[in-house]
Structures are given as structure tokens and as C-alpha cells.
Amino acid sequence: MAEYLPLTALKAFEATARHASFSKAADELHVTTGAVSQQIKSLEDILGVKLFHRLHRGLELTDAAQAGLPTLSNGFAELAAAMRQIRDTSDQPSLRVWAAPSFAAKWLVPRLTDFIAAQPDIDVNLVASDAMIGSGQAVEMFPADSFYQENIDVGIFFGSGEFADYRADRLCGVSLVPLCSPKLVRSGKHRLRRPEDLKHHRLLHDDTAYEGRPDWEGWLREAGVDGIDPHRGLRFNQVSLALEAAIAGQGVALGMYPLAQADIEAGRLVVPFEPAIALDYAYYVVSLEDTADKRGIRAFREWLLDASKACIAAPG
């Protein structure tokens, strides 16, 4: 057996075992599925044992893998805790912040300059991940020990607020509204003046997989509009992409108002008409109970809550 610890391969194995999926492990580790599979094969060669049974319905741990997995998972947790202890004794505090990609791009990043100006001695490491989307499902993907394993200080979740074993503070509520370029309202043969005018325009769809998200079918039903196919148009897997397409005049997006607020205030987007559909979900800033009052985490949370005061759920 090799005299070194193949940490990358061990991490790939631990993530794959936890998710019972190469693809989900790859998403968590921000690598390709092929890279994870290759790391598993490398580890199997080093250890001289098979780690997974590749079944038609998915992956199943071998007896050898099941025997070693708990100790390995605990080992990664201990390593992460040691890194946190070393970092927390440093004169230069830093924060690892996880957020959904569209929230990071459209809301958080444009405001980070203010936090840096207020806290110049705190370094921020921002990681965008779709795992931050959802409520209970997201927390199940990132239980408390995973905050340690992934060295996460603060996570910004979109969900219902059910975050057991965490401190969770509500940032802002969310409403779904139609969004388009001002030129679709001001000019053209089929200007957008009322919901029925959507039949002349391309629908832009945000297919982000999060709980409680109405789609165009639900919005048109709420607006009392018939005769429009709610499934036609362009589809995107991130909110920010749908908003960029709307800004470019490619159609009408159904988006979350807080994420579009800066573009609306800058005149790049408009809400052509109502209704605005309020969701039962909101954005929350989440941290572990036992680290929530550390200086850097507390400072970032307080700054976020203050910045969110200017965030409104819907126009009007």
C-alpha cells in the first residue's frame, strides 16, 4: 500500500458513499463525474479492495467500504475542525460563505464592497453552489458535520426556515413577477400592457430545482389568462441566466423580485404588470449554533441583515 494518504481519492469516496451517487458527489466536489469515478478506481487499486457494487439501481457499498466509512467520515470532520481551530487563532480572520449561484451573482456580490469596506481585516471566500437551494432537502445534504467538513462558516439558503440545529435569520421574502426589457413595454407592434399580451412574446423559464417555485403555468392561472402555452420558450437552469435573457430583450422571464431589484432600479428590467405571487419561502442566513457568535460570522450576519432592509419582496 502507498505510504501517503490519497486525500483527494478518499474525499471522492466519502462523498460518493454519502450520496450513493457519482454525479451528486461530483456536484458537491465541483469536479466531473468522470473525475470522481477515476478517483474511486485509483483508491480501489491502492487499497486492493472493491468499494462499490455498481448495480442497475445505483451504487451499494461493499462490506469493506462500510467498515471503513464511519472512521473516514469522522477523520474528515476532525481535519476540518483542526483547520478551523488554526484559522480562528490567526490574526487575519476569514469567512467561507456558500450561496446559491443566482443569489450570489445578482444580490450578494454587488453589495460585498460595503462589507469589505466595513470589515477590511476579514477575508471572504464566496462559493456558489446549487446545494444552497431548498429547505429541508438542502440541510439534509449539508448536515451540521458537513459544515465542518466543507469548512463553511455561513450558508445563505432559500427555504421555509426549518433549520434544526442551526441559527437561521430571515433575510427577505420573495415574490414571483414577470420581468422584461423596458423596450418591450415602450415600443413595438405588440407592446406588453396586460398579461394577455404575453401570447405575442417568448416566455423565459427558470428551471432551478427549488421547493415552492411557481412556474408560468401557475402564474398564468393566477392572472386568469387562458390560451397561452405555458411551456413554450427558452429554458435556463439558473435565475441569473433567465434575467440576462430578459435584459437582452429575448422574452419575458418569471423571476424572484429581490434578485431583479438592482436591474429594475438601474432601468435594465421592468415589471410590465401584475400579479406578484408571494411565496411561502424566503432567503435565510444560516450558521452553526456553536459558531454563530464568532466575530467574523457575527459581523457578516449583522451586515447581511442590515443590507437586506433595502430588499423588498415585491414591487409597489
Image: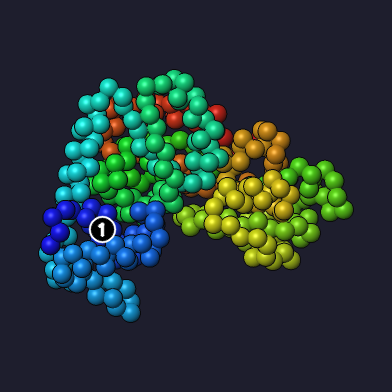
Q: In which quadrant is the C terminus drawn?
A: top right
Q: Which residue is painted at 43% across and 49% down in the image?
A: 129
Q: Find residue 133 and report its horizontal and vertical position in percent.
A: 44, 50
Q: Secondary structure at mark 1?
A: helix
Q: Quadrant of residue 299?
A: top left
The residue at the far bottom in this view is: 56
Q: Position of residue 94 (x, y in %)?
A: 33, 30
On the picture, is 272 further left or further right than 26?
Answer: right
Q: Is residue 41 above or below residue 181?
A: below
Residue drawn 28% across the image and 76% down it: 54
Quadrant location, the N terminus: bottom left
Question: Going by the image, does 44 lie left or right of 311?
Answer: left
Q: Position of residue 6 (x, y in %)?
A: 21, 55
Q: How is the rendered protein coloured?
A: rainbow
Q: Is residue 214 visible?
A: no
Q: Nearer the viewer, residue 142 or 63?
A: 63
Q: Is residue 94 visible?
A: yes
Mark 1 — residue?
9
